[in-house]
Amino acid sequence: MEVHAITRNARTTPQKVREVARLIQGLPAEQAVSALRFIPRKTARLLAKTLQSAIANAENNHNLLASNLIVVSARVDKGPVLRRFRPSAKGSAHPIRKSTSHIHIVLDETAILEKKQ
């Protein structure tokens, strides 16, 4: 059974989140949470929060044990871009693009059962 958690419009670029998301794919959920604790980046905190939400969804909605869950995928998509402008010389303006991200984490219990067999 797959369990999902999504964080939308996270105020960081998708590229920065993907660097950290690659590290937790395929890890057991509890090990992924502990790994994210020691990464000193804002994106690690965002991923940890989403991962904790996925674990809570599994425990409360599907009666699954956190110790049996594995991170099947941690996908990061591009969100809407906030466009701002900065004044520059001679009355002109330079654009500033503030990127956002959508973080999708999928946990699965059956992946561990398949590895044991």
Image (cartoon, rainbow, N blue to C red):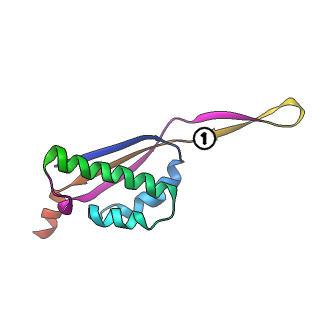
> Which quadrant is the C terminus positioned in?
bottom left
Badge 1, how many Cα within 10 Å: few under 14, some, many 20+? few
Residue 48 within the segment the image draws in magenta: no
Q: Is residue 112 visible?
A: yes
Q: Which span is picked out in magenta?
A: 64-86
Please, is residue 4 above or below residue 110 in the view? above
From the top left corner, tell me how far across and down residue 100 is, in percent.
52, 41
Height in image: 115 above or below 109?
below
Q: Quadrant of residue 31?
A: bottom left
Question: Which residue is at 26% across, 64% downward?
Answer: 28
Residue at 48% from the left image edge and 59% from the top image edge: 19
Q: Which residue ends up furthest to the right in the rendered image?
A: 90
Q: Which residue is mark 1?
A: 98
Please indicate, yes or no, whether residue 18 appears anywhere in the rendered image.
no
Q: Residue 3: horizontal and vertical position, in percent?
A: 23, 47
Taking the image as shown, residue 15 lies to the left or right of residue 37, namely: right
Q: Position of residue 36 (x, y in %)?
A: 40, 63
On screen, residue 40 versus residue 21, left or right, reads right
Residue 74 inside the magenta-drawn segment:
yes
Task: Locate residue 68 relative to residue 102 in the image: left or right.
Answer: left
Residue 86 position, x and y percent, is 75, 36
Q: Residue at x 12, y 63 (%)?
A: 113
The one nearer the camera, 18 or 31, is 31
Farthest top residue in view:
91
- Residue 107 relative to residue 50: left or right: left
Q: How many marks?
A: 1
In this view, the residue farthest toward the left is: 117
